[in-house]
Image (cartoon, helix red, strand yellow):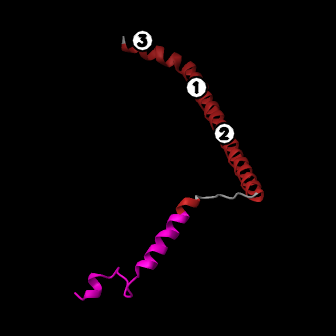
Amino acid sequence: MRPVDEFRHTPLIPISEKDLLQHKQKIDERNRKGYYVEIKKDTIYFYTIALLSLGTVFYTFLMVNEKQMRIKSELEHTKMLRTKSSAGRKGANLLPERTANNQEKR
């Protein structure tokens, strides 16, 4: 390996002690300042309107889905009632045949 590959993170131009000290002082000053967050009224308005509109869209999809599920369950319920009622009619119609079969088996 070449010496440049071994020490690739070291600068080619040596840094003086004075520059290093200034750099550390700048970092210390930045750390002492703290962080300030600035939020404008326009930003608050925008995010409030966006949140309300997204909430409205989500609520609409939720209600449409609930309505579809209710319609589906009602259709299944009526289908089940139809099959039960038609089975009851068949059972009533087959009753004489059943009694005849039961008498033959005896």
Circle 1: element type: helix
Q: Position of residue 59 (x, y in %)?
A: 70, 44
Q: Position of residue 89 (x, y in %)?
A: 60, 23
Circle 3: element type: helix
Q: Quadrant of residue 63?
A: top right
- Of residues 35 and 28, the one nearer the viewer is 28
Q: Residue at x 37, y 14 (%)?
A: 105
Q: Residue at x 61, y 34 (%)?
A: 76
Quadrant housing the C terminus: top left
Q: Position of residue 9 (x, y in %)?
A: 35, 79
- Of residues 3 and 23, the one nearer the viewer is 23
Q: Quadrant of residue 88?
A: top right
First of labels 3, 1 by sequence position: 1
Q: Which residue type carries mark 2?
A: Glu
Furthest-left residue in view?
1
- Of residues 45 and 53, the one nearer the viewer is 45
Looking at the rendering, the stretch of residues picked out in magenta corresponds to: 1-30
Q: Quadrant of residue 38?
A: bottom right
Q: Which residue type carries mark 3?
A: Gln
Q: Which residue is mark 3?
A: 103
Q: Is residue 5 magenta?
A: yes
Crowd tier of the residue under label 1, counting other residues whose Cα lies within 10 Å: few below 14, some 14–19, many 20 or above: few
Q: CA distance from mark 3 to mark 2?
A: 54 Å
Q: Which residue type carries mark 1?
A: Lys
Q: Which residue is mark 1?
A: 84
Q: Which residue is mark 2?
A: 66
Q: Say which mark, if any, is on residue 35.
A: none
- Of residues 20 and 98, the one nearer the viewer is 20
